[in-house]
């Protein structure tokens, strides 16, 4: 499955990448599984995308939870939670 990934704010800064086109194995079915797949790259990827970190996700510009199924050609965005002040 081909996906377009986007990374925002502190995630983008840590990974030093703002977007990536990626083909993932058919076994990757949800955003949670995608996150684990990316974290398995190790290094800063494992640190930034660790399951213990709170991240927000969007699928095709709609806020979704980690159990949301992926869709062929979808845009997946990862960004940190936003706080007001």
Image (spheres, rainbow, N blue to C red):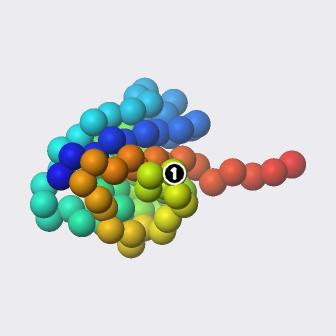
Which residue is depicted at the point 53% across and 38% down?
Answer: 8
Looking at this rendering, what residue extends furthest in the right direction?
85
Picture coordinates of residue 67, whole percent (x, y): 39, 72
Q: Is residue 10 above or below residue 76?
A: above
How many marks are shown on the rendered structure?
A: 1
The foreground one among 11 and 18 is 18
User: In the orientation shown, which residue stands out farthest toward the top?
Assistant: 16
Please give the residue where the numbered disc 1 appears in the rendered image. 61
- Identify the residue at image location x=27%, y=36%: 21
- Where on the picture, by quarter, is residue 19? top left
Q: Sort mark 1 into few (<14), some (14-19) or many (20+) by Cα contacts within 10 Å.
A: few
Seen in the image, is 85 located left or right of residue 1? right
Question: Which residue sits furthest bottom?
Answer: 67
Q: Give me the residue at 23% from left, 40% from top.
A: 22
Is residue 65 shown to the viewer in this render?
Answer: yes
Relative horizontal placement of residue 63, taking residue 51 as reference (left or right): right
Between 42 and 28, the residue placed more toward the observer is 28
Please give the name of the residue rendered at 38% of the width and 47% of the height, measured from the top-left corner: 75
């Amino acid at each position: 499955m081909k996906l377009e990934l986007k990374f925002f704010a502190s995630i983008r800064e840590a990974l030093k990448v703002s977007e990536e086109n990626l083909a993932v194995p058919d076994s990757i079915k949800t955003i949670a599984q995608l996150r684990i797949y990316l974290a398995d790259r190790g290094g800063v990827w494992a640190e930034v995308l660790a399951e213990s970190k709170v991240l927000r996700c969007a699928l095709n510009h709609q806020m979704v939870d980690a159990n949301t199924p992926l869709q062929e050609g979808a845009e997946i965005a990862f960004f940190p939670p936003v706080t007001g002040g």
